[in-house]
Amino acid sequence: MMSFAPCIVIPIYNHKDAIGATVAHLAVHGLPIFVVDDGSDEATQQVLAQLAREYEAQLTLLRLPVNGGKGAAVMAGLRAARDAHYTHALQIDADGQHDPTDVPRFIEAARTEPGAVILGRPVYDESVPKARLYGRYLTHVWVWIETLSLTIRDSMCGFRLYPLALACDLIDSVPLPTRMDFDIEILVRLYWRRAAFRSIPTRVTYASDGVSHFDVLWDNVRISRSHTRLVCGMLVRLPMLLAHKFMPRRATLAGTQRAQSAQSAQSAQSAQSGGPHAQDWWRIAERGSHLGMSLLALSCKLFGRRFTGLWLHPIVAYFLLTGRAAREASANYFRRLREAEPRGDTPRPGWLSAYRHMLAFAQSGFDKLAAWSGRVNNADVRFEDPSAFEALVASGKGALVIGAHLGNLEMTRALAAQGAYAKVTAVVYTEHARRFNSVLASANSEFTRHLLEVADFGPETAMMMQERVDAGELLVIVGDRVPAHEAGRTTEARFLGATAPFAQGPYVLAHALGCPVYLFFCLKEHDGYRLYFEPFAERIELPRRERTQHLAAWAQRYAVRLEHYCRKAPYQWFNFFDFWARPKRGANGRT
């Protein structure tokens, strides 16, 4: 991706007396400056020409032939900055009202969160005209209605920073107003596109002899017309805006790939298509906001599972449309599933199968929440054959249980906590799903009591686990993801007709613990959840001289059983990344 490259854009119309000081105060920050002359008079043009000569190495002067309005000038400046390969543009008015010493704060905020729009939140002194001050709040209220949010604290401040890929993608695809209403409408429409916003308090001063081009009559008419258009747009988008409440704002830009270098773009394409540089699963950010998940939990408590479950359909549809990488990973999985066994009932890769795949994942998460909230009872979960599990519990011995991201592994842990059938501890990479785990923890205080976070299944982990196994606990881990650690060791096994990396950790851990090992899968069926609990090994031995071969044999045995259950419930394997991509390390963990 291109390195962070900010610049400054100044729209100007007949501010010949203020522009010199404005440029001088901004130039000290060393940023490139684009000044857009919006058809100014001859006197202002002469001042600008002199500034262009004085700051020749830093200032680019653009001149629009006729006055088109502030919006037209800003859009011209943003496009010019993008074409010059800058990534961010700090817009600031030419009249000197804004405090140029705050520029570093805006730049640092954008550097920290490159995908966010950074807005100035004015802090006025006594110089502010009261009519303009109170009038602004009317617009703020309309913006809050149009976005169904209080996120945009001030929509009219002329001191703001845009990510250029995001802003230019909007102005190139949607007709925006070209006058004073531009500042308002671009923010609302960026919000509709799920842009993130951050506000920075900044001092605003009105000079007694300052020149204002705000037309009290016609600009207010234009702003009112813009609000009417935006309210109508909000009503049309109402279902999606409500769905957005359950999702995070954009952390990255929709148009970032267009701004990447050829090499980075190729790497991104490889990640989406399953190439050698595919993104590791733990680098994929958790999607979904804590607020949205909490609202689902609240709805589940107030209105029940059936009603709340209806919300999953529009939410999943949204993630389907916006989650290209997950969508392609789903298609890749179903393609391999069909190639390995081309039966007529095997799902075909495509939008429908991806939707059903993601919906099954959402329902699984919803069922976890319901289980920890006490809304799933024992009658909803049944063993296919309970003999192995009952014998293990009766023996009082501890064991290692290897599961997968297949079906709903969490269901049994919740039921075990409720019924005290066995001591069950989940060993997980919890940093990858902290928001969801926090919601589960708020639903039931027992959730975190038997939850251990690890980075890799190595000797240190084994020492931590030994006491729990000796106390008769069942340690539940998953075997279908490589370690969330650069040095984690993997081994290769055949899975759905192709070689895939599997973690060595579960078998190394089992060897160190010296305990029985079981496989466990919990699949959703028409009449509830069906549990499959089967012996895997009484004890796993890893002789030093034949360690590699034994690890490969155990991984292959696990892969065969995982493949069996994937065929049994094809929509319930929830690894939405390129599972077959080789990790960014050697097969045995050597870089």
Image (cartoon, rainbow, N blue to C red):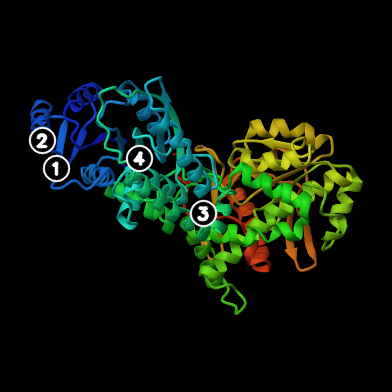
Q: Is residue 53 left or right of residue 373?
A: left
Question: In terms of image quadrants, where is residue 359?
Answer: bottom right
Tell me the amino acid under the disc marked 3.
Answer: Phe
Tell me whether the residue at label 2 lies in contact with that at label 1, contact meaning CB atoms closer than 8 angstroms.
Answer: yes
* Residue at x 76% of width, y 37% of height: 450
**Mark sitting on residue 63:** 1
1 or 3: mark nearer the eye: 1
Foreground pick, 43 / 574: 43
Foreground pick, 561 / 554: 561
**Mark sitting on residue 426:** none
Q: How far across and down, in percent of the image, does residue 317 sit?
A: 56, 61
Tell me the amino acid under the disc marked 4.
Answer: Tyr
Give the Cα distance between marks 4 and 2: 27 Å
On the image, numbered disc 4 is attached to which residue?
162
Q: How far across and down, in percent of the image, does residue 364 sit?
A: 69, 56
Please say if 87 is above or below 556: above
Instruction: Give the mark, 2 or 1, whose residue is nearer the N terminus.
Output: 2
* Image quadrant where one finds the C terminus: top left
Q: Residues within 10 Å of mark 4 (few under 14, many from 20)?
A: many
Instruction: Give the mark, 1 or 3, whose residue is nearer the N terminus.
Output: 1
The secondary element bearing badge 4 is classed as: strand
Residue that extends furthest to the bottom in the rendered view of this protein: 344
* Residue at x 76% of width, y 42% of height: 443
Give the Cα distance between marks 3 and 4: 31 Å
Give the Cα distance between marks 1 and 3: 48 Å
On the image, numbered disc 2 is attached to which residue?
45
Q: Quick check: can you spot residue 143?
A: yes
Instruction: Give the mark, 3 or 4, whose residue is nearer the N terminus.
Output: 4
